[in-house]
Image (cartoon, rainbow, N blue to C red):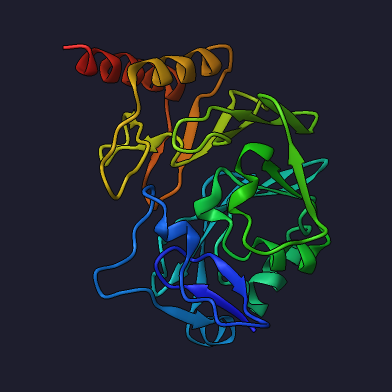
Amino acid sequence: MIKVCTACGTSYDEQREEIKRCAICDDDRQYVPATGQKWMPLERLLLNHSNKWQQHTATLFSLQTVPGFAINQRAFLLRTSQGNILWDCIANLDNATKAIISALGGIHAIAISHPHYYSTMQDWAAAFNAPIYLHASDREWIMRSSPHIQLWHGDEQEILPAVKLIRLGGHFAGGCVLHHSHNDGLLLSGDILQVTPGANAVSFMWSYPNMLPLSASTVSDIMLRLSPLKFEQLYGAFEHREILTEAQKKVLHSGEKYIACLQK
């Protein structure tokens, strides 16, 4: 039986013995709710939830589960002439979602920013026969095996000629963002870069729920890896968290402010 942690959305295959703890939530970068660890059979999730879609540009769609479930992040479908990329993942893969994605051209590859969004990636990959690109530094957080998982190493991984993953680290050692170099450039960041409520800046954390920051040196390294890129827009993990103009300038300025605050 596949069951899903209701706090983080990670899926587990419970076969021989009962799984009582979620390793993702036991880690200090997530949390176990005060009410305790709870699980939901995947079948029940599919029965009681659906996904809403939003088109942001001619080539970028987001999807998010309603009612909100677990961390309630968005996934993105980036359409390119060479194939579609699913960026990050949500637990609910229902028949309506499969039909919409198939109508949009299917999925060429799946790429995930960090382990909090692994969710039911194995089921998405199986449904669309797509490889899952995960950074090797985060392999310990893979809770279900899949023949579709492809671990990548180093600081960059090209998926398509204009689409590559950039490892920034920080929140997780393998934490990465997706850069699409087409036109003025686009960055999909998960919460490796957390877009702030004003949608004009980003911030950085090692643990968001426990409010544990990253060091100045780590953020400086992140800025160095981002500085050669060109991106006018940035889309974060959560609804309405996107920077639609001068995103690179605003990200680099945010990094400078963050480092300055830590050095006071």
Which percent across, then down, holds residue 126?
79, 66
Which percent across, then down, holds residue 197?
26, 42
Q: Quadrant of the C terminus?
A: top left
Q: Quadrant of the N terminus?
A: bottom right
- Given the current orientation, which residue lies at the most extreme front position? 17
- Given the current orientation, which residue lies at the most extreme left position? 264
* Identity of the residue drawn at 47% across and 16% down: 221
Left/right of residue 191 with respect to residue 80 in the rendered view: left
Which percent across, then down, holds residue 39?
46, 79
Report the number of discs.
0
Left/right of residue 190 with respect to residue 178 in the rendered view: left
Left/right of residue 28 with respect to residue 87 in the rendered view: left
Q: Which sits in the foreground, 13 or 51?
A: 13
Which percent across, then down, holds residue 209?
29, 50
* Identity of the residue drawn at 62% across and 28% down: 166
Q: Up-down: is 229 above or below 108?
A: above
* Identity of the residue drawn at 32% across and 36% down: 199
Q: Up-down: is 188 above or below 36?
A: above
* Identity of the residue drawn at 80% across and 29% down: 161
Q: Residue 133: which quarter of the image?
A: top right
Q: Residue 97: which quarter of the image?
A: bottom right
Q: Which sits in the foreground, 185 or 135?
A: 135
Q: Residue 258: which quarter of the image?
A: top left
